[in-house]
Image: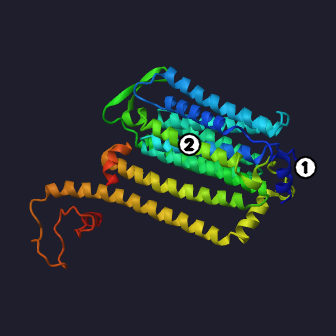
Amino acid sequence: MPTLPEIGLQHYLFVGAAMFSLGLIGFLTRRNLILMFLCTEMMLQGVAITMCAFGAYHGNMAGQAFTIFILTIAAAEASLALGLIVLLFKERHNVDSHAWKQLRG
Amino acid sequence: MLGLSESTATGAASPFAAPALTVALCVIAAVGTMIALPGRSKTNALRIAGAGMMGLAFLTIAILLIVWAGKSLGSISYAYFWLFAAVSLICAARVVTHRLPVYSALYFVITVFSTAGLFVLMWAEFLAAALVIIYAGAILVTYTFVIMLASEASGKGMISKIAGGEAELPDHDGVAREPVVACLTGFGVLGVLMFAIFDRAGGLNAYGSIGDSPAMTQTGSIQDLAVYLFSEQLVSMQVAGLILTLAMVGAIMIARKRVMFADDERLAYEAETVVGPSTPPDDNPHSITVSGESGPRAKRPEPELASLD
């Protein structure tokens, strides 16, 4: 029988929430397109911590299974986003999101 | 169900902190992040002070958590939780506030490692391994690759002191966009989430220990996960595989556009050497199009096949 961690559910939920918020701030403030997507990955990781904590709290595997799907989506998103960023960089030689301002319409 | 009822009995009575205190801590952390974000007129000492403010707010929240949980720093895994949580949050803050993109990516690697540690504490060993392999091994390597491929100082830059030397920093890395609004938004979200976590969680509003259910500790956790995934989540697994395939096809399509771009450049270069059109242009759709056409879908003679023979 391993030593049980004496940490409550809310501790993990707070870490997940704080990581989500920091990723949100990074997504809003950074102007580098690559870093914006990196901060999106960080938000996904905060959600993954939350999912896993709820799964461990309820004692079933749903949280971990959902985290695996989050990892899948993150991998797909990273491949597509980085391909797009390389394409955009070839077009304008810039990774500044302000260079694509006219996309706002 | 047992965990829910007994934890409701033990800890539902004590509130986490006064709402005003939570709001004040969030505002302090927001102001600290605002100062710590890169900007044109910010010195390094000022940004360190902002990071200190943010760290102070999070430290206060940690102390409140300890007091609220009513436990002392006794158990060894308790210490591991605080270690991993502190490292992951500090490095997450560095990802957001660091000026150089490569350093941000490397700090994110440390965040991934400490998150994997948190997963191990939650009895999710397979996820910890998968996180290190997929995130730190694949995604972050790709990110670093793209950062180094697509980093080019453009336009007017600012001079920044980095590791003793001075380096030219492009404007989009050195100046944050709308730091006030973004920090208020982010820490507003955090305050609302904290309110939901600590005050309005209903049956979960209690001190429930993670990982003490028999299913998580007695049998192999990875085996249970595999059985769950391939029995109850079978359709979701297939959809996940479909999404990965679609992403692969999409990435190949994006990469193909790049190849056509290079192909067009070569054709444009060749078109300069062509004196005149080889066939007279007309509106007949079955005729071969003019050589030197720059459209990617245009029909054109294939000189490289002829040269191969």
Label 1 crowd (10 A; few <14 / some 14-19 / many >=20) = few
The dot on residue A1 is 1
Q: Residue at x 33, y 48 (%)?
A: A101
Give coordinates of residue A10: x percent, y percent: 73, 46
Q: Residue at x 40, y 27 (%)?
A: B40
Give coordinates of residue B273: x percent, y percent: 14, 55
Q: Residue at x 71, y 69 (%)?
A: B230
Chain containing mark 1: A
Q: Which three-letter amino acid code belongs to the residue tagged 1?
A: Met
Give coordinates of residue A58: x percent, y percent: 78, 57
The reply to whether residue B115 is visible in this rendering is no
User: Which residue of the protein is positioned furthest toward the right in this rendering?
Assistant: A1
Labels 2, 1: front one: 2
Q: SS class of the residue under badge 2?
A: helix
Q: How is the image coloured?
A: rainbow
Q: Which three-letter amino acid code belongs to the residue tagged 2?
A: Gly
Q: Is residue B260 left or right of residue B161?
A: left
Q: Residue B274 falls in which quadrant of the image?
A: bottom left
The reply to whether residue B94 is visible in this rendering is yes
Q: Residue B218 falls in which quadrant of the image?
A: bottom right
Q: Is residue A56 left or right of residue A47?
A: right
Q: Is residue A7 left or right of residue B27?
A: right
The dot on residue B146 is none
Chain containing mark 2: B
The dot on residue B188 is 2
Q: SS class of the residue under badge 1?
A: loop
- Nearer-the-camera pick, B138 or B168: B168
- Nearer-the-camera pick, B304 or B66: B66
Q: Residue at x 55, y 30 (%)?
A: B32
Give coordinates of residue B174: x percent, y percent: 42, 32
Question: Marks 2 and 1, Cα distance to the nearest angstrom?
Answer: 42 Å
Label 2 crowd (10 A; few <14 / some 14-19 / many >=20) = some
